[in-house]
Amino acid sequence: MVHTVSVITATYRPVAEYLDDAYRSLLTQELPAGWDWEWIVQEDGTTGEAAAMLPAADSRIKPGMGRHGGPGVCRSLALARSIGSFVKVLDADDQLAPGALARDIEALQQPGVGWTTSRVLDLLPDGSTIGFDQDPPDGRLASGTVLDHWRRNDFRASVHPASLCIRRDLLLAVGGWMALPASEDVGLLLAADALTDGWFTAEPGMLYRKWDGQMTAHPTHLDPIERTARMRLIDERAASMHITTRFDLIAEQRTV
């Protein structure tokens, strides 16, 4: 039996060079015996541009498209076409580091771990990379740890949501990506953190491309009114899930 990691890529106005770099990074992945990946590339629109940029000969690539709805909607449509028990996020302008998927699979097989992230290197236009100097230690992240850090550090998570790999059942249980114009991946990360332990891999797992066309570089991403609204809703959702989990644990303990 072959197990599958579904790599989900949402793309809007795709850049052929960046999609090709993402695909090449997938080709470098060496997975454990009995595992394979599929690449679900979903265009946030109906132009067909993304599909035309992808190699037609690789049956593991599954392009699709749908009406424009933003990154959360786009990823949800991609998820509906996927089959993997693990779901890996890969933005259309980013690249996986060699061995990233194998390390994700290993981490998600640890008891009680529902999601995993890894060290991220910013990929600058000149080809150089810069790492983050405040990564957590390698290993397990207790449930609620990321949310606590996020609240104490101006809504900046201790791990990068763009490197997330998550169990499919957990992804569905938290309702997937939030219906927000941005930060929908942060919302997913913190919801998962509220329900289960996570894992952080200190070895770099992703190259995060920094360029003028990325969503986080757009001025609207930092609009204070919208940002405040996004952060408040993300916080409320994660907090409610964390409280619900505590109630469930208390109820379970009382029945033992």
Image (cartoon, grey):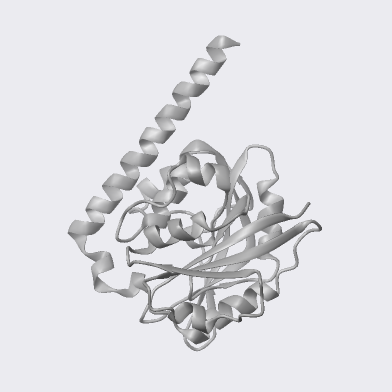
Could you tell me residue 54's position as x and y percent?
Answer: 56, 80
Q: Which residue lies furthest to the left in this view?
A: 225
Placement of 14 over or under 90, stated as above or below:
below
Q: Which residue lies furthest to the top in this view?
A: 255
Placement of 8 over or under 94, stated as above or below:
above
Q: Residue furthest right?
A: 33
User: On the image, which quarter does residue 217 sit in?
Assistant: bottom left
Could you tell me residue 39's position as x and y percent?
Answer: 59, 67
Could you tell me residue 202's position as x and y percent?
Answer: 63, 59
Q: Residue at x 48, y 40 (%)?
A: 173
Q: Residue at x 63, y 37 (%)?
A: 112
Left or right: where 74 falls relative to 86: left
Q: Is residue 156 visible?
A: no
Q: Which residue is drawn at 63% across and 64% down?
A: 38
Q: Which residue lies furthest to the bottom in this view?
A: 126
Placement of 132 over or under 236, stated as above or below:
below
Q: Which of 223 and 72 lies nearest the eye of the viewer?
A: 72
